[in-house]
């Protein structure tokens, strides 16, 4: 081939390649993240784009089920989800990063009631009352509550007078603060973050008790995400603590840093989910 023609073809191919923009990486946020912190979303988007050298699209959905389905179908590349959806659908996800909150990769579920309720000491005291769950697949917002009732020999389907799903830990807190429900189980990380942002609202609630500690809600990647993309995104998240803007973002998220994490962090969640779902199957057979 004529060398001038070869050079021309290489230039054309190079120009075409340069003109083709990189596909956006699609990341999702769920009830774990405070939806109103759009300023943090914008800053995090800019931070990731500058470090990954590609566009980032943040997606927010109402339920964990929607995010799981999108990860499965390839519509999402990664998502910050709850620990229960992670252990329930591990075959379609890979653990990407886990936040360190208050020095540990752990968090707790808080049982909360209206401030004026001074009588409630446990979930059993809420028999016949109205109760809010955050999401059908939430560990802190549903499975912990179900587990407590089952251990006490109660039937969760008939224990409360009424239950509802808020699909947001913040909305569960608001429902309790406003007296719309008599109690809720909520993510302790979200509750404490809300206390720094909206102390008046939190002041209208009372923490009755805290659960055992569980693995902190993880950031996961879809199983089919290419290895190089997985490594790059994980590397950026794990190195946020090492630069000023990254540390500022982590502070805005209430986190010390991100670590790679290990599956054993979620053993307690997996046991709880298994026990609750086994009990649910037994109840269904009886009925």
Image (tube, rainbow, N blue to C red):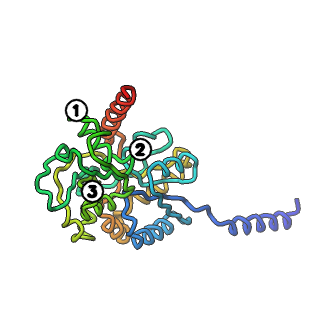
Q: Nearer the viewer, residue 133 or 13?
A: 133
**Mark 3 or mark 1: which is in front?**
3
Task: Name which residue lies at 34% across and 61% down.
Answer: 171
What residue sits right under mark 1 in the picture? 153
Res. 191 visible in picture: no
Tell me whether the residue at label 3 lies in contact with that at label 1, contact meaning CB atoms closer than 8 angstroms: no
| Label 2: which secondary element | helix
Res. 159 visible in picture: yes
Where 204 sits versus 103, above or below? below
Left or right, 140 with respect to 90, comes to left
Image quadrant of residue 41? Answer: bottom left
**Mark 2 or mark 3: which is in front?**
3
Left or right, 82 with respect to 192, comes to right
Among the two numbered marks 3 and 1 on one chain, the one whose residue lies closer to the N terminus: 1
Left or right, 209 with respect to 4, comes to left
What residue sits right under mark 2 in the picture? 86
Q: In x, y percent, where is residue 219? A: 41, 52
Q: In x, y percent, where is residue 192? A: 24, 61
Where 87 sits versus 189, above or below? above
Please tell me the numbered disc located at residue 181.
3
């Amino acid at each position: 081939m004529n060398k001038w023609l070869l050079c021309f073809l290489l230039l054309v191919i190079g120009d075409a390649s340069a003109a083709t923009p990189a596909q956006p990486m699609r990341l999702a946020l769920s009830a774990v993240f405070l939806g109103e912190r759009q300023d943090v979303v914008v800053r995090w988007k800019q931070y990731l784009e500058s470090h990954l050298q590609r566009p980032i699209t943040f997606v927010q959905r109402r339920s964990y089920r929607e995010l799981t389905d999108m990860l499965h179908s390839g519509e999402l590349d990664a998502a910050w989800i709850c620990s229960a959806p992670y252990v329930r659908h591990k075959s379609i996800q890979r653990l990407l990063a886990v936040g360190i909150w208050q020095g540990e990769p752990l968090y707790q579920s808080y049982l909360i009631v209206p401030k004026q309720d001074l009588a409630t000491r446990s979930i059993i005291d809420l028999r016949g009352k109205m109760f809010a769950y955050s999401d059908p697949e939430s560990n802190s917002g549903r499975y912990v509550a179900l587990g407590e009732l089952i251990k006490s020999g109660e039937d969760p389907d008939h224990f409360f007078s009424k239950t509802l799903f808020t699909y947001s830990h913040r909305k569960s807190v608001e429902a309790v603060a406003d007296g719309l429900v008599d109690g809720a189980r909520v993510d302790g990380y979200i509750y404490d973050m809300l206390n720094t942002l909206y102390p008046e609202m939190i002041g209208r609630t009372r923490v009755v008790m805290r659960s055992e500690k569980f693995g902190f809600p993880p950031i996961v990647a879809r199983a089919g995400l290419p290895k190089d993309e997985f490594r790059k995104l994980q590397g950026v998240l794990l190195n946020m603590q090492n630069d000023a803007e990254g540390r500022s973002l982590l502070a805005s998220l209430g986190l010390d840093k991100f670590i790679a994490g290990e599956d054993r962090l979620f053993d307690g969640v997996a046991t709880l989910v298994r026990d609750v779902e086994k009990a649910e199957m037994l109840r269904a057979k009886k009925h």
